[in-house]
Image (cartoon, rainbow, N blue to C red):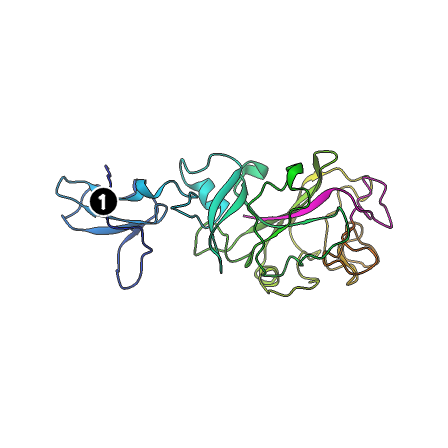
Amino acid sequence: MATGKLSVGTVAPTAALNLPVYGTEEDLPNNGNIGDMVYVRDKKAMYIWGSTGEWVGEGSAAGPLGSSGNAANSAKEIFDSPGASSGSGLYYLSVPGEGTAQVYCDMTMDSGGWTLVYATHHASAHTFVWPSSNTYYSCGFNPRSSGTATTEGNLPNKYTAYGATSSASATDFIIETYDYGNGNADYIWKFAFTASVGGTWDSGNNSKQDNLIPASLSNTQLVDNCGSSNGTRPTTDTNDGDHWTDKASPGSGGNWDIGRPDGSGGDANEKDANCNRYGGGGPGLHRSSKTLLWVR
């Protein structure tokens, strides 16, 4: 199958056009009739069967998936598209309400394909949104770079907007606490979304949500460097409204690990109360670090 440039424009398929849709150029049929038109999803372009006996279109002119002229749905979509990923970094994604925006994508953690959807820092008490908020703050930065230690980000519709394809929701999410002093993660835990939990993530409620990471979710430990509660998953349904997560007693109350991100309460924006990697056990502390949320 051969392709070339044709000035037909990069468009989205619509019911009015009624074009056959193919995932990649490699999926195109090997023959056709002159004038036949199709749409190639990963190129976001129309192709036409020409008089030379080949498909021609402007998919190559649009650039690889994840470039400024060919925004992707998610890091996972880029990761799964042959030749599109150039490693972890900034890619252009379609963000609800924002059009096209650069978003940091991790292409190596847990087999790759993770979209950064939330980042809040713990260096000092300050005001930021809760992770169930749909207020947009750019995630176009490397969250593990010390140069962005106090840069925060939040994407809307975290569950439904960044699946492997435009018609799919995310299937998994990760919560990571990253410490700039040590240059690595305090812990990284992966969870499987349920529709109920995903609905909480997309709710737009700028407040504590118990159902964000309930203790009942299927989970996998990827990294855990905590001095206390090592091997215990973080949850959101086992602490009071003055805190965000608990990493001591999933299924029962009275503990916390990360304080509220909105600057209120006596433990505002603090961390390490249960993890206790830095002596914060109990009261928690402010430290140059972040809590990150990723979806795939």
Q: Nearer the viewer, residue 270 or 216?
A: 270
Q: Position of residue 223 (x, y in %)?
A: 69, 38
Viewed as shown, does residue 6 lie left or right of 83? left
Magenta residue span: 271-296
In which quadrant is the N terminus drawn? top left
Q: SS for tag 1?
A: loop
Total label count?
1
Looking at the picture, does residue 68 appear above or below residue 267? above
Residue 241 lies left or right of residue 6; in this view the side is right
- Chief secondary structure of the magenta span? loop
Tell me: residue 10, above or below residue 223. Answer: below
Say which of 102 and 115 sits in front: 102
Q: Which kind of residue does numbered mark 1 sit on? A: Leu
Q: Is residue 273 within the magenta segment? A: yes
* Of residues 137 and 41, the one drawn nearer to the viewer in this rendering: 137
Drawn side of residue 183 relative to residue 268, left or right: left
Residue at the spot 55% in from the left edge and 37% down from the top edge: 111
Asked whether, in this view, residue 119 is left or right of residue 95, the answer is right
For residue 75, above or below residue 214? above
Tag 1: Cα neighbours inside 10 Å, few (<14), some, or many (≥20)?
some
Residue located beneath label 1 in the image: 6
Which residue occupies the foreground of this view, 249 or 113?
113
Please provide percent x and percent y for residue 28: 27, 44
Question: Which quadrant would residue 20 be assigned to in this image?
Answer: bottom left
Q: Is residue 256 magenta?
A: no
Residue 4's spot in the image, x, y percent?
24, 39
Q: Position of residue 263 (x, y in %)?
A: 75, 58
